[in-house]
Amino acid sequence: MSYVPFDVDHYERQEELSDLERTIFSNRRYRSDWAYLQSSVPRLVIPLIDLVAHAGVSDRLAVSSVSVILWHVSRTDIPYWSWSEMQWLALLDTQAGSRPYLAAVAYHMGGFRTPQRITKFRQSAIYASFIFGHKIFKDELTRLSTVLKSLGYTARHLEKFLSGVLGALMLENGDPRLETFTEVLLIKGQGHRSVGIARLVGKVSHGLAALGILDKPLRKRGYADWREKSIEGIDPVWVSWCRRWRDTSTLRPRTRESNYSFMLRTGIWLTREQPWVSSPVDWNTSTCAAVIAAIDRMTVGEWALESALGTKLKGLGQPIAPNSKRAFLHALRRFFIDFELWGWGRLKFSPRHHLATPRTVAFNSGINPRVIDDSSWLKLVWASLNLERKDLLSETHYPLGCSDQLATQRRRVAICPAPSAIC
């Protein structure tokens, strides 16, 4: 991919301001007059105007953004290319101008290469396209999107996540070209402060492997490390048992994290409704009946942890779904079964019996099937008939024989003339 970075070497960058520059920049009217600025003080203005074209910022935002930079030059009496990181951060944390454009100026002219440190940093895709240029960002996004679609990802799914995770990786890498992405970069990306981006890096690695940039996609999940949750309002004894279970369990990391959250939220209910219960051995059949009733009547956000209060919860205040009730009770059963199985204590009840999912909840739970249109179904059938070893990215979990047998069974189901027919 042809990419030419923004070249700053041909600009004249002296360390001192001239008296004329000081006079002009102190005047608010002059700071917005581009024609006058280009003719009178070109060395400080032309790089900013060139970056306007590079970033693709609108004229309205460009005028206010350049004006605010020149105003800060007047205040500090220092050219913007000599500002410290703290001075750039002070400017970037203001409301004036276009923050992504200001970040592009800081990146190229000020050597400030970590826009992620901006307090109100949002939408990494926008920052990446302003810093590296809209064309290269769009071209690389299209390349990656095309290959991921060929691997089976839907266009709707890609529109939701791909631009954000790609922008974050470009900024972390310091180079927007996909060919420069490495496994080390992606592993680092899995530790991103945004959980959504961290969990989607693996999908990007599948696209890079298909393009031949990586030898194989990543297998490590981005949520393997614990993102600690709030324990405010929960009995410390209950918290200690929850953490002990989390650190001992051999469930997959995401399942452990989810179950750990369920148990902490149960601790909130215990503190409110049964504060005398702080340990698993304090539970009895009455406690089980009470928690089942509470879960059955629970609303979205009712037992939310302090660390989750800032997130937007869909359906806030509405009854939780039957599947959520079932998952909550399953997590509690697993916790108490493991507690007794591992010899941590003797319970006064049977988790499988006294914390069983009520029939009404189980009846209303289930899968939510999606109808597949005929053209998509025919594509799947054709793919199953022509499956070859080279089509598989990896056989670590699903060898060719396993995939082929599954495809055969799907074809047999597809050609059954009626549900009662024997195929």
Image (cartoon, grey):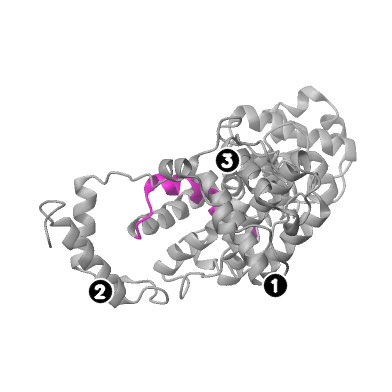
Secondary-structure class at tag 3: helix
Whole-percent x and y of residue 421? Answer: 11, 56
Is disc 3 surrounded by few (<14), some (14 to 19) or many (20+) residues within 10 Å? some
Q: Quadrant of residue 31?
A: top right
Q: Quarter of the image for the C terminus: give it.
A: bottom left
Q: Earlier in the sequence, mark 1 or mark 3?
A: 3
**Image: magenta residue range:** 151-172
Q: Residues within 10 Å of mark 1 (few under 14, many from 20)?
A: few
Mark 2 vs mark 1, foreground winner is: 1
Front label number (3 vs 2) = 2
Disc marking residue 388: 2
Whether residue 175 is visible to the viewer of this picture, yes or no, is no
Identify the image quadrant of residue 150.
bottom left
Task: Identify the residue at horizontal 64%, vertical 48% (top origin).
Answer: 288
Q: CA distance from mark 1 to mark 3?
A: 68 Å
Residue 326 in view of the camera: yes
Residue sitting nearer the eye, 155 or 381: 381
Residue 160 falls within the magenta-colored stretch: yes
The residue to which callout 3 is attached is: 53
Q: According to the image, label 1 marks what residue?
A: 343
Q: Where residue 147 sits: x, y (%)?
A: 37, 59
| Upstream in sequence: badge 3 or badge 2 | 3
Q: Residue at x 54, y 67 (%)?
A: 180
